[in-house]
Image (spheres, rainbow, N blue to C red):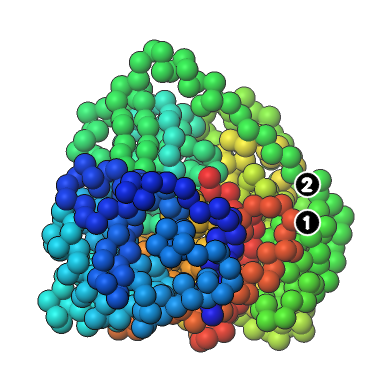
Amino acid sequence: MKLIGVVLAVLVAFAQPARADEQRAWVKSIPDAKTWKAYSRTVGSDEFGKAVIDVKTNDIYFIDVNLFNIHADFVLGVLLKQPWTAQNIREYNKNYERVKPRFILCYLTHHLKVDKWTFSFWEGDKIGPDDVMRVKKRFTETFFQKDLPFRPDSPMQQKVAVEVKKRGLATITNDEIYNAAEFQAFHKGKAVGKLKIVPVGTPFESLTFDRHDIVLLQESYPDITPVAGIIATQFSTPLSHVNLRAGAWGIPNAGDKKAREKYGKLDGKVVYLEVTDTAITLREATAAEVKQLEDKIYSTKHVELPQADTTTPRLPMLTRIRAKDVLRYGTKTSNLGEIVTANLEGVRVPPGFGVPFFYYVQHIQQAGLDKKIDAMLADPKWKTDAAWRKATLETLRKAIVDAPVDPAALDVIYKRVRIKLGGKGVFVRSSSNSEDLPGFNGAGLYDTVGNVVGKKALGDALKTVWASLWNLRAVEERTAFGIDHKQAYMGVLVQVGVSATAAGVLVTKNLWDPGDDHSFTINSKWGLGERVVQGQKLPEQIIFDPTNDGTKIISRADDPVMLVFDEKGGIKEMPAPAGAGVILSEERAKKLSNMVEKFIPVFTHGQPLDVEWVLEGEDVWIVQARPYVGS
């Protein structure tokens, strides 16, 4: 059975059943809030408890979750008093099937952010409508909160929810709870800085922050330069670029839909910010708080870049690139090359080749921009004048794009596209030596140009990607991590474009439950994947447990439009498919997760992986893999 492996692993970890007085270990009713507090536990922003119903006797047991980590601890150790053998585990696992031989295993949750109560079941539980109704009846008889709605945790349970709703039982989805929350903590912590409220309507291009600002954003932005803390009145997913940035910087970051009303009077003042699982504290800072935290706030991190080799002009296919080639082709290309050359059965990566740092350096030198870059970095205003720095970088990027690509170089690169990639539309993707590193994610710092068709378009795309090494957000991020800009180089990954049905990001970590060691967080949207990480619309978010194929739904996508290939080249926007249902069915999530599991051993840094993927029909493709730096 599917559950045997995971339950066996968990039970082995608790090979000695909890020893406790049985009268304290469980009660037959929860008559009031005081009893609930004694038998429940708070994890993150949820207060939860557990119950077991004996289907033969109809007895109910509310378990002390501080004594019993999982239902099986209580059922086997206390109710059945059985040894924890493989056979007993198999019998216990049958209680997760549609027909329950002995027990119904339940959860009760107080969702603190929205002050709502629900009852639910493990997402892999195949419980049917009759048993759901039975549980509701027993809770009404024994639990002090009387109007508990059923909260389905998986696609299968959502079908059951439709049935019980017809019978008069209220239901609520995780998506509804997520959208109803006025608060969401993305990264906990404390900071002191100057509060800067960004006015509504401020264009993304005009955003300029000091490293020590605490910013209050009233719109969703695709990215942000380094700051000391973030509060947003619009928020979507932990995997947006802004939230990934905050995790990498180690700063407090939260969403609060009413933040402008609450904290507007503090604009321009030095404030103390603290983010916990359930609340924000924002007030004027005391002198003592400033002194206590200033060392941490003003300390500079330092990330060493791999020493670059700028002498190699070769354009190898991914099948000939390994991780060690990061010195010539950048981390994005070398990471994918390592996956491809591992030759793992069933792992699909679109064909592509690496354009080394050699061609970036050639372009900069032929345009005479190397001397201008040296002068820019040596100017005293580089460190002290943010407006000057921003304007100078804009001028530099324009010069890089305006300068002609060496004709011989473009001929060689375009010939590679025609012969090795069949002349198809390609993605021209950044692959610098200053991204996708342990300790420095750099997600979204640099540019990608999609569905590039033709020689001229290829030359323009190459220059766009080269110029993005000097994006303001990239420069500020590298500065925050103590990276030497003179040692940063831009390579390019040229890869066959996949006309995505849907796309997204998978992290080999449960971002919603730190205690879950084996589940993956997956975000997805219809069409190409840029909208997922921009964080401007809510994606579909699920938690998938590959050890038992369990799918827990966090939210459904709310973006009415999607990005697709334009037949003439480039990207266009069109309406998302109406009534298309879920993006990641359990089967698709399983296929994606199993593919990722195969190449996790390729990476030896020990961190969770951040994987970008696309779905073409029912085929899954991997287009990027890097260390996850989010906490």
Residue 66 in percent (x, y) is at 40, 46
Residue 232 in percent (x, y) is at 33, 45
Query: 279 or 20, which is in the foreground?
Result: 20
Residue drawn where x is 25% and y is 71% of the image: 58
Which residue lies under the disc numbered 2? 306
Judge the density around disc 2: few (<14), some (14-19), many (≥20) Cα neighbours within 10 Å: some
Q: Is residue 207 left or right of residue 49?
A: right
Residues at badges 2 and 1 in contact (C-beta under 8 Å)? Answer: yes
SS at mark 2 in the image: loop
Query: 243 or 155, which is in the foreground?
Result: 155
Which residue lies under the disc numbered 1? 326
- Give the residue type at disc 1: Val
Residue 340 picture quarter: bottom right
Tell me: residue 318, above or below residue 200.
below
Residue 332 in percent (x, y) is at 68, 60
SS at mark 1 in the image: helix
Q: Is residue 361 left or right of residue 79?
A: right
Query: 438 or 120, which is in the foreground?
Result: 120
Q: Is residue 267 visible?
A: yes
